[in-house]
Image: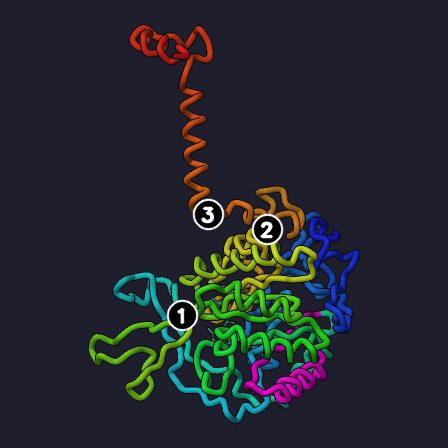
Amino acid sequence: MESLTLRASPSSTASPLLRLPGRRRAASVRVSASGAGAGAGEPDLSVTVNGLKMPNPFVIGSGPPGTNYTVMKRAFDEGWGGVIAKTVSLDAGKVINVTPRYARLRADPNGSTKSPIIGWQNIELISDRPLETMLNEFKQLKKEYPDRILIGSIMEEYNKAAWHELIERVEESGVDALEINFSCPHGMPERKMGAAVGQDCALLEEVSGWINEKATVPVWSKMTPNITDITQPSRIALKSGSEGIAAINTIMSVMGIDLKTLRPEPCVEGYSTPGGYSARAVHPIALAKVMQIARLIKEEFPEGGRSLSAIGGVETGNDAAEFILLGADTVQVCTGVMMHGYGLVKKLCTELQDFMRMHDFSSIEDFRGASLPYFTTHTDLVQRQKEAIKQRKAIRMGLQSDKDWTGDGFVKETESMVSN
Ligand SMILES: Cc1cc2nc3c(=O)[nH]c(=O)nc-3n(C[C@H](O)[C@H](O)[C@H](O)COP(=O)(O)O)c2cc1C
């Protein structure tokens, strides 16, 4: 069953490879809709985004679940729609991680280990594996899974030649698209990497220009939420030629202070540094950011061809449905996989299909963006409420039928029908 019928682009199969001028066609990919969640007569979860065809909209978000060949292979085997590898750079030798680098927040105020994890902080850097090793693994994966979508996540220093070299080498490995990490919240800001670029619109414009003049596969720019207005860098990335926006990366956080030792967490040799917050607790914040970007794309890029990959706190099909209702084309999951494993995709697909069945939606395009028009300004809410109250009062005025007259309220009922 062919999906994506309502939106001419970027998902239309009639014009499947929406390219910005000069960008080569995305690798031709054929994926049967028989991946996780698809079946005869079932709601169709398949999506085609910037020419990338996936059996379902669920994509592994860049992070530990995309660190090496073994885990990415596992993701494909379990049925994920696509995989975004852990962010790579030219010189992994500069990336030095510490341990512990994660800290968790539980729902129980006293932190009972029986209560569910709702928040996750990490101070992890990008991949510390040699670029050549990662590229060989990308090549191997594309050889074994030619029809599956593998996206390379990249980050570099403020240096045009370095960006160009990285893009060329990662593209050569056969990836289907690139996600640009303009959003890593910790580590290396002094080298103008990650969020240091995403938080500085002038820098972002320049670096985006370098990237988009070089890249020949679709480019998704991944945004940081650690900025006042996420639409500003998103607009610049799209105007510079990026086909898509991915949002959000983690939110700057300090997980807590150990009240016995008085040291912050996660504690490395007695010290800590602010990290990035993810998992269920960030979902409402991610929804707001995704809503803002979806409106930007709809209002300022009506010609189509621009996509939105939503990220943040997804653990259920309903979480994903919310993102899609706001306008997301794909939904990424990172911490959810770290907590529940790669098999989570099956549950996500089943639950998303349950939601679709409830509303009689047969494809993702049937409901993508359906909730977006219901956001407005507070001033407009006040006006709408005034109008509604006026209308309700008008209905209360007068009797609809002679059977409605009452003995006790007779005089008031008469009054309600007098015009002066
Ligand atoms: C341990 C960890 C490492 C991460 N590493 C990367 C990374 O290398 N590149 C990147 O773009 N995002 C990275 N992220 C951010 C995630 O891709 C994602 O944007 C964020 O965690 C929010 O989604 P989630 O709630 O599904 O995890 C990382 C997240 C975690 C938890």
> 239 or 88: which is nearer to us?
239
* SS at mark 1 in the image: strand
Q: Which residues are magenta?
A: 148-174
Q: Tell me which residue sits at (55%, 60%) in the image.
A: 293
Pair 3/2: label in front: 3
Q: Residue 9: where, in percent of width, then height?
A: 71, 57
Report which residue position mark 1 lands on.
120
The answer as to whether callout 1 falls within 8 Å of ligand 1 is yes
- Total residue callouts: 3
Q: Residue 260: where, in percent of width, then height?
A: 20, 77
The answer as to whether callout 2 falls within 8 Å of ligand 1 is no
Q: Tell me which residue sits at (48%, 76%) in the image.
A: 195
Of callouts 1 and 3, the N-terminal one: 1
> Can residue 341 be seen at all in this image of the molecule?
no
Q: Residue 398: where, in percent of width, then height?
A: 42, 14
Report which residue position mark 3 lands on.
377
Q: Tell me which residue sits at (76%, 57%) in the image.
A: 13
Of callouts 1 and 2, the N-terminal one: 1
User: In the rendered structure, does residue 154 fall within the stretch colored magenta?
Assistant: yes
Q: Relative to 357, is 97 above or below? A: below
